[in-house]
Image: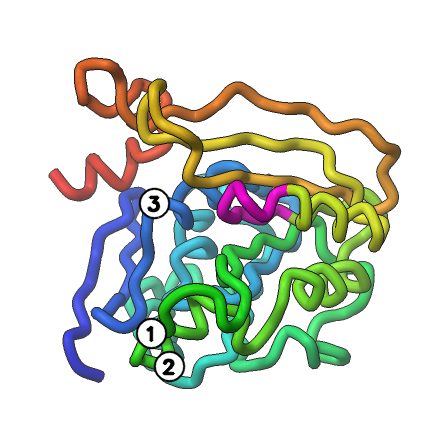
Amino acid sequence: MKDVRLEDLGGGVRIAVSREYGFGTDAVLLADFAKPSARQRVCDFGTGCGIIPLLWMRENPPVHTYGIEIQEGAFPLLNKSLEINNELSQRLSFFNADLRELKGLIPSNSLDLISCNPPYKKAGAGAASPELSRGMARHELSCTLEDVIKAAKPLLKFGGRLCMCLRPERTAELISLMHEHNLEPKRLRFVQQRADTPPWLVLVEGRKGAKQGVTCLPVLTIESAQDEYSCEYKEIYKLYGAAER
């Protein structure tokens, strides 16, 4: 692959990324929002370069983590990350698969958590990317929000969580779909750059079989009034930031 580079995520974990398959702030925030425990079995849908599973490997890694990615082009990176983090390879499994066709790949009712950073725009909404990999990451070319929810439901245990991030304008759509498929929305958090700017991201958690009632968490602000990163944002990034230094 061209342009492959290694990034240190902290905690002794490194990741292989490229210009075509990288990650952004939204993935880091989703990994923190979902945050599995060491006793759990978890999965990341549309894992891309594997950033969310690898962030979970830094402290108290889950018993086992699966990553599902439909794009074959990402797999040399995923295999490289497994190679350079060899001690974690028994805890990680990456599958080149369509999340709409997972029957038999992961046992039903076996997962405590599924995360997904889905395409933010519907097919045909906004300018199309000339690169297929970026187009699939940004637009619903290979799956829709409902596809994600339908795929997650049979894999989750009763009480298992589906955690997703999305643009705020699709919040009502996501909550409605979760409710419709018995993944009841339980936690919601908006993210904004500064206190005087509108949110650019929403984090939502649904629980399988849960009762109705959602907790709206305080807004996560990226920057303080002094144009410095907020204390909470720096805490989320602490290991990654320490590695960069």
Judge whether residue 166 is colored magenta: yes
Q: Is residue 159 above or below residue 78?
A: above
Q: Taking 65 as reference, is 28 left or right?
A: left
Residue at position x 52%, y 76% from top?
141
Q: State the CA–CA distance, disc 2 to disc 1.
A: 7 Å
In magenta stretch: residue 102: no
Percent of width and height locating residue 139: 48, 68
How far across and down, in percent of the image, does residue 30 sit?
Answer: 48, 44
Q: State whether residue 82 appears in this view.
A: yes
**Mark 3 in CB contact with mark 1 (< 8 angstroms):** no
Q: Where is residue 112 in the image (x, y as percent from the top left)?
A: 71, 49
The quarter of the picture where residue 235 lies is top left
**Few, some or many C-alpha atoms within 10 Å of disc 1 (few <14, some 14-19, many ≥20)?**
few
Residue 35 shows in this picture = no
**Mark seen at residue 163:** none
- At horizontal 53% and vertical 47% (from top left) the residue drawn is 165
Furthest residue in direction top, as rendered:
225
Q: Which of marks 3 and 1 is nearer the N terminus?
A: 3
Residue occupying the point 44% across, 53% down: 52
Residue marked by disc 3:
25
Q: In which quarter of the image is the C terminus?
A: top left
Residue 129 tag number: 1
User: Residue at horizontal 20%, vertical 63%?
Assistant: 6
Disc 2: which residue: 132
- Contact (Cβ within 8 Å) of mark 2 with mark 1: yes
In the structure shown, which secondary structural element does the residue marked by tag 1 occupy? loop
Q: Is residue 101 left or right of residue 220?
A: right
Q: What element carries label 3?
A: helix
Q: Say which amino acid is labelled 2.
A: Leu
Q: Nearer the viewer, residue 196 or 47?
A: 196
> Which amino acid does the dot numbered 1 rest on?
Ser
Q: What stretch is highlighted in magenta?
A: 163-171
